[in-house]
Amino acid sequence: MTQLIGILILSIFVENFVFSQILGLCPFIGVSNKFDSAYGMGLAVTFVMFVTGIVTWPLYHLILVPLQLEYLETIAFILVIAALVQFVEIVMKKTARNLYQALGVYLPLITTNCAVLGVALINIKRNYSFAEAAVNALGGGLGFLMALLIMAGIRERLELAEIPASMKGAPIAFITGGIMAAAFIGFSGLI
Amino acid sequence: MQIIIAVAVLSTIAFFAGILLSYASEKFQIETDEKTEEILKYLPGVNCGACGYPGCQGFAQALSSNEASPDSCTVISAKNLTKLKTFLGLETADNSKSQKRLGALIKCNGSDSEEHMKFTYEGIKDCQAAVLLQNGPWKCPHRCVGMGSCVAACPFGALSMGEKHIPVLDESKCVGCAACVPACPKNLIKMVDIDRRVHVLCNSTDTAKEVREHCKVGCIGCKLCEKVCPTGAITVTDNLAKIDYSKCTDCGLCAEKCPTKAIFVEPEQPNTESVKETQPTENKADKK
């Protein structure tokens, strides 16, 4: 149990996908304009990451390893993730139409989100057990959600700040992200 | 052999993923209401909210379930309205043309000289923000703040900021959606029949002395217009003239009599000529 909590904290704070592993920057910059859509996107990514972690682990250990097809992990994972994202999109279109419209093009983009693929590959690389892999995926998603929410909160305030015209929008967002990443180094050594 | 297994495994995974997706798209299919879709085609699609429903989609749903009347949409063109009514099986009323069209009226004549300013405002270009500081930069508490919040609020680009820091309406673009009304912190914008030409361009209920102090073109409540009006359409209450548009005949006698030219006859606006150029000059009022 302690092990699992350790992995959760590790994946949320110490090895935050955005700040420490520099993965998933596309939605991090693209959807962090508004707090509400950032929240929706964060939840969508968290959900997809969690399900990905749960699905890819048995896929690898029960199908690829016995067949000695470990080299297929990347393409197999992408296939599964793409199908999952499509599934989430269809369900969301039906049940949460406003959220679906708010996310727009970024929901299909989760398909090629490296954070989602990253969590699946890291689970394999670190030889996690199934429970550990699930916790790691959940933590990765929550860490991503947290990064997105912090960023959206800062950017909503930046809208009102007086900054040079050439720095408005993405440039100041990247600088903000960089400073936040530097701040997150403070968590290293926690676990 | 190895390559065949690899292809087979991936194909199998893809096959099951395909089954999952086709099941999901069947299970979570969105029933698109064909009637709503058809109605939506006739609507302007600008989502201004003038009808009181959340966007054209919401209005179309309300129409399709007979909860709303097509007349609620002030933006729709007469041609599309007729088509929509025919589609809905409603009586195509011929009086749709005589139906009055609403337009925004900014009830301020705008004294622009510097002596009528309390200070120069250099903050955020927003009326609400400017009002927070000493109730705006102008001495007159009712004067248009002139930061253009209504201009920004107009989804049709019908408002623009005139030279006197008063928004100018382009009547050909205004559809009467009233999106600008809540944007004004001074409540200066009223929706009136757009074809009406005579208007009281002042919203000040202050006494004549106060109005004179901070404006040259405001209504001072002298009641000259009340006396001259042949149809009794104008009444002065709380030091402010008010036109009853149901009685007004657009004769313009009141505007001639008005000593401060707060009552104003708009010229016919066939083109996009702006109102500000034809507004009474302040010099005239100065001589009084």
Image (tube, grey):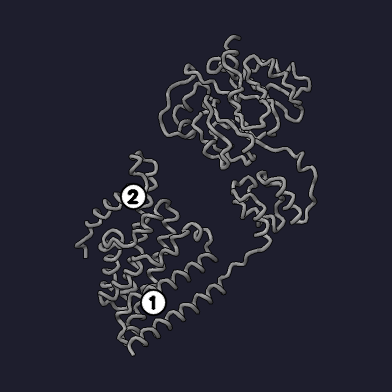
**As drawn, is B92 to the left or to the right of B181?**
right
**As drawn, is B14 to the left or to the right of B110?**
left
Give the residue at x 70% y 52%. Answer: B68
Residue position for label 2: A173
Q: SS class of the residue under badge 1?
A: helix
Identify residue type, mark 2: Ala
Q: Residues within 10 Å of mark 1 (few under 14, many from 20)?
A: some
x and y percent of residue A151 in the render?
A: 35, 52
Chain holding disc 1: A
Sequence order check, earlier mark of 2 and 1: 1
Q: SS class of the residue under badge 2?
A: helix
**As drawn, is A76 to the left or to the right of B285?**
left
x and y percent of residue B222 in the render?
A: 66, 15
Q: Is residue B76 or residue B63 the one in the foreground?
A: B76
Question: How far apart are the alpha carbons under marks 2 and 1?
Answer: 34 Å
Q: Quadrant of residue A24?
A: bottom left
Q: What mark, if any, has residue A55 been given in the picture? A: 1
Viewport quadrant of the N terminus of chain B: bottom left
Q: Quadrant of residue A121?
A: bottom left
Chain holding disc 2: A
Give the residue at x 45% y 33%. Answer: B125
**As drawn, is B176 to the left or to the right of B186?**
right
